Image (tube, rainbow, N blue to C red):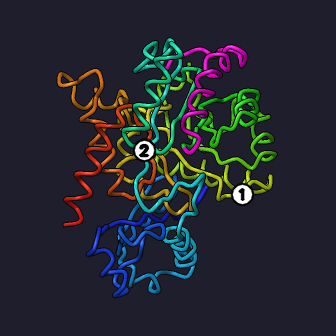
Amino acid sequence: MRKYYTRACNFYYGNYAKKLVKAKKALPLAGNNNIAFDQLEIFERKKRNKIKSKFHHISKINKLTNQLKEVVKKDLKEIISRRKKICGIEFNKPNLMGVLNITPDSFSDGGLFFNEEEAYNQAVLMINSGAKIIDIGGESTRPGSKTIDSKEEWSRIDRVLQKIKKKFSHIPLSLDTRKSLVMKKGIEFGISIINDVSGLNFDKRSISILKLNKIPFVLHHMQGTPNTMQKNPKYNDVLLDIYDFFEKKIKHLQRKKIKKELIFIDPGIGFGKNLKHNLRIMSKISTYHSLGCPILIGTSRKRFIEHIVTKFDTPDRTGGTLSSVIYGLLQGVQIFRVHNVKEINQGILVFNKILKN
């Protein structure tokens, strides 16, 4: 557990950001001159897990205490470093990961794409609507869901994967699974990314599979299991506890000779978090840039939207999803996992156009 944590904040965008970086009045976020910042929020864990935070201008870093300055400078190096391409994906602009649940019981679209042809058509629609990655899953991990065996999970996705790969060989396919056997089959098939919502905790053989095949993967946070995760989740401080989880796990994976350049991080909105937890994570999500990995978030159609809008809830929750995506974009999040690709892409394109004027 850390004592200090560093969050980039006070962001600037577009041409103005570039001017500030060129004038050395701001720093680029993750090597992207289109988003710059000139302040840091430094969190301190005090006794009994009390959290204190203070804002500092980047020009004042050298006035910090020696102990704090050492931490901040190390974090700052990660915050500003350019993220290397993964599977041809660049991180100087937002990327959409289209969700394809080939399940009868997923929380939002369970059963809608359980048919092979319908699943394939949905993948085609998302790719044509601007998805840069398709995330395919054959097992629901919604709150309260039950585990299925690897054979059944693979049988649900096998033929759809073949059809998508044949037609769209240039699109990276992500496999949403917690099981090493399914990972192995997917990698043999030509999957580009593994997305394990358990944070590689469900199946201890998963890390060996990733190490052997040197494949990129999403390191996801979840408290508990899908069956238990929403039963009164508790944290000392959800934002910083998840940071500690990522930092510890990344170091463990590096000791296993897995390169950090292969890791995406996903704080797991709705996976063992209540509304207060989710909002805390999203409002300060730029804290995770100091881990040095691309950030992925999945807010699409999540229950927290209903909790906020109450009687104004809609089945697809496109408005709530888009607002959370735009906020994430402003915080430098690089990948957004969404269901309604066309609508979200439309919102991002319009927002970016306005931002650049």
The kind of residue tagged 1 is Lys
Residue 320 occupies which quadrant of the picture?
top left
Secondary structure of the residue carrying tag 1 is loop
Q: Position of residue 244 (x, y in %)?
A: 59, 52
Q: Which of 61 and 220 is in front in this view?
A: 220
Secondary structure of the residue carrying tag 2 is strand
Q: In which quarter of the image is the N terminus?
A: bottom right
Q: Mark 1 points at which residue?
A: 259
Q: Name the residue under label 2.
A: 96
Q: Nearer the viewer, residue 51 or 26?
A: 26
> Does 148 lie within the magenta span?
yes
Rounded to the nearest angstrom, the CA distance separating label 1 from label 2 is 24 Å
Task: Tell me which numbered mark, 1 or 2, is placed earlier along the sequence.
Answer: 2
Residue 25 occupies which quadrant of the picture?
bottom left
Highlighted range, magenta: 143-170
Q: Where is residue 201 in the image (x, y as percent from the top left)?
A: 69, 35
Q: Nearer the viewer, residue 290 or 6?
A: 290
In the picture, measured across the screen, residue 138 lies left or right of residue 30, that is right
Q: Position of residue 237 (x, y in %)?
A: 47, 47
